[in-house]
Amino acid sequence: MKNCSLWILVARTDVAFMIHTIPHLARMSNFPFEEKVLAVDTAPLMGEKASRPGIGTMQQLRDCTEQLLKASVVDRVVDINYDRDYRNQVYRQHFGSPIRFTHNYKGYPILGSIFPIEECKSDYMLHFDSDMMLYQKPGYSWVEKGIDLMQRHPNLMFVRPLVGPPTEDGTIYQSCPYEKDLDGFYKFKFFGSRVYLINCERFKQLLPLPKIWRSYRRQFLNRLPVPMKTLYSNVTGKGSLDSWEIMISKKLEQTDYVRGMLTNPNAWTLHPKERSPRFIQALPHIIERVEAGKYPAGQAGHYDFIPKLWLDSNF
């Protein structure tokens, strides 16, 4: 078995729930990780991230990470490296040239997404956003299965477990097209960054990624070639990058590589967009139910957590 490390990205936006979700993710993953690491985003909040409810202070974030470290939930806590020389070096490798911006238009960290891949010491890396929830049946390891598939399928660039709890007929509600492989996974050309398993060395074969800029207010700028847009944005500080996952999706479309989603119902994830005080209060109980493999019938096949099914009923 190749070695694998677990990396979870955390920021001030996660203070309200991370003390519950991160132990849950580490526990349910149930894999002998070489190390479990928290990557801390210390940059000022921007975009939609700055207006999210329940934002904590940097000191509260530090207190949470220290608590998780002392409880041996994680082995290491490291700040994302925002040094300019480091950023330029990494961006040259990942995008072909330096870029001034470290976050996308929504405030999600692009440099912070790349940082764990660059700093991971293992052959394989499992990434989770800190708000995710995971079910895994005792005795089953989706990470082990994912590594096995990646070793046998050289075009598999990413692997993740099933999205949402399983339906009786195997239906998954996805807006992007996919194909089913007989070896037990769905093949996508669209990438999602909230949870993924990668081979760090194989990922280098996907580089450089295309730089994708959001539309500028001045229309003539939108007609410029990408290198000119990048130069303009670097010099003026104006312009916004699209999402890292969109850039990866574009590169997947241009190559033979795919993202794989396991079809096995013994492991699945939920992504809660909910941040209300009611949800935060109910979160420990919700996690208990997820870990037991229990869920409302209407949640089956759906990737995003449906609050009314969990909070307004006793299923």
Image: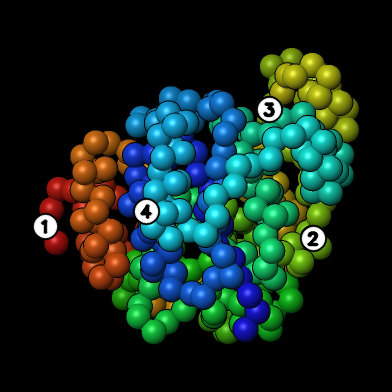
* Among the two numbered marks 1 and 4 on one chain, the one whose residue lies closer to the N terminus: 4
Q: Amino acid at mark 2?
A: Lys
Residue farthest left in this picture: 314
For the residues labelled 1 and 4, the Cα–Cα distance comes to 22 Å
The foreground one among 118 and 247 is: 118
* Among the two numbered marks 3 and 1 on one chain, the one whose residue lies closer to the N terminus: 3
Mark in front: 4 vs 2:
4
Q: Is residue 86 left or right of residue 301?
A: right
Label 3, on which residue?
Answer: 240
* Among the two numbered marks 4 and 3 on one chain, the one whose residue lies closer to the N terminus: 4
Q: Amino acid at mark 4?
A: Thr
The answer, for residue 171, to whether it is visible in the render is no
For the residues labelled 2 and 1, the Cα–Cα distance comes to 47 Å
Label 4, on which residue?
Answer: 21
Q: Amino acid at mark 1?
A: Asn
Label 2, on which residue?
Answer: 204
Residue 280 in picture, x, y percent from top left: 26, 43
Label 1, on which residue?
Answer: 314
Mark in front: 4 vs 3:
4
* Labels 4 & 2 near each other (Cβ < 8 A): no
Residue 74 in picture, x, y percent from top left: 48, 58
Residue farthest front in this picture: 70
The foreground one among 222 and 265 is: 265
Q: Is residue 5 left or right of residue 253?
A: left
Quarter holding the C terminus is bottom left
